[in-house]
Image: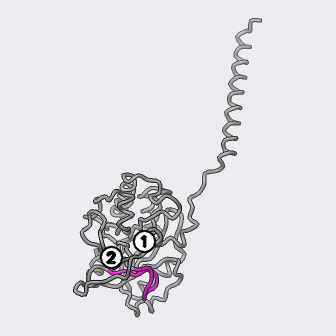
Amino acid sequence: MTRTAPEKSRAARRRLGLAATVSALAFICGLAIAGPASAADYSKAADTVAGSQIYLHEGAQGTPRFDPDVAQTLGHDVSGHQGPIDWGQARDAGAQFTYVKATEGTGFVSPQYSQQYDGAHNAGIIRGAYHFARPDVSGGAQQADYFIAHGGGWRRDGMTLPGALDIEYNPYGDACYGKSQADMTAWIADFARRYLATQRRSAVIYTSTSWWKLCTGNTDRFGDTNPLWLARYAAQIGELPAGWDKQSIWQFARGGTLPGDQNYYNGPMNRVQALARG
């Protein structure tokens, strides 16, 4: 039987309607199978602190030995893992500077940040904030913005160190956060550029030489622009990542006379003050 033009038009509309229904059902079924997009995992954020993963992967190789002819300034770093800090006691025990964990990724702020950061300042200790990098959850610039918005900014008060980017082994999976060496280098550069652009200070980079080699290919891109805070629990500082001819800070032990991790600034107190003043 030959169909009229109106009949053909109605048939075509029915076919289109059926196709749309099938497509919609397929989409709904796909959502049911795939489920909603999973949120970033921050389940370990309270315990992922500067060096926690470096110690886990690299361990400790001995008690540090220091050259008595080279001035070193004692400091430490803390996080929510340590809870509230008695800053007067820390000062009396020799703390002259400190770094405090502020943020992780774009979804975690340390619950102890204010007590630790402001408390150090009130005790007369030069302090700075650090950000635990999560290149797996968002971009470098986005994380720099999050860090700055939640306490990582620099202040022109002579008592605030520039913010530090803690970039180390991934506590949630692949050591390099699933990134190639080139992509990791670009991510760090993205963070560093944004921090410099907004704060007019270069962020400190915290890392270990082994991680830097593994995940950036030992890039020398940052040695002339960003101070190095090196983690190595050994008798000597050892090899530095490419590009740096010296470290600004050495995190040399996971515990000691001060709360949290133990650090030495590579120079006398007036060099710490100079870094704070910018």
The outermost residue toward the left is 69
Residue 76 spot, x, y in % from top left: 40, 81
Mark 2: amino acid = Ile
Q: Tell me, for residue 249, which label it has, or none.
A: 2
The stretch in magenta equals: 253-264
Residue under the point 31% across and 77% down: 236
Q: Tell me, for residue 226, which label it has, or none.
A: none
Residue 210 spot, x, y in % from top left: 37, 65
Q: Quadrant of the N terminus?
A: top right
Residue under the point 47% across and 81% down: 116
Front tag of 2 and 1: 2
Looking at the image, residue 239 sits to the left or right of residue 166; the answer is left
Residue 87 spot, x, y in % from top left: 45, 88
| Mark 2: secondary structure | strand
Q: Is residue 180 above or below residue 118?
A: above
Looking at the image, residue 31 sits to the left or right of residue 177; the answer is right
Count of numbered marks = 2
Q: Which residue is mark 1?
A: 130
Mark 1: amino acid = Tyr
Looking at the image, residue 128 sits to the left or right of residue 137; the answer is left
Q: Is residue 56 above or below residue 98?
A: above
Q: CA distance from mark 2 to mark 1?
A: 13 Å
Crowding at dot 1, Cα within 10 Å, few <14 / some 14-19 / many 20+, comes out as: many
Q: Is residue 17 above or below residue 211?
A: above
Q: Is residue 262 magenta?
A: yes
Residue under the point 70% across and 16% down: 9
Please tell me in which quadrant of the rendered image residue 117 appears.
Answer: bottom left
Residue 199 spot, x, y in % from top left: 35, 67
| Mark 1: secondary structure | strand
Q: Is residue 200 magenta?
A: no
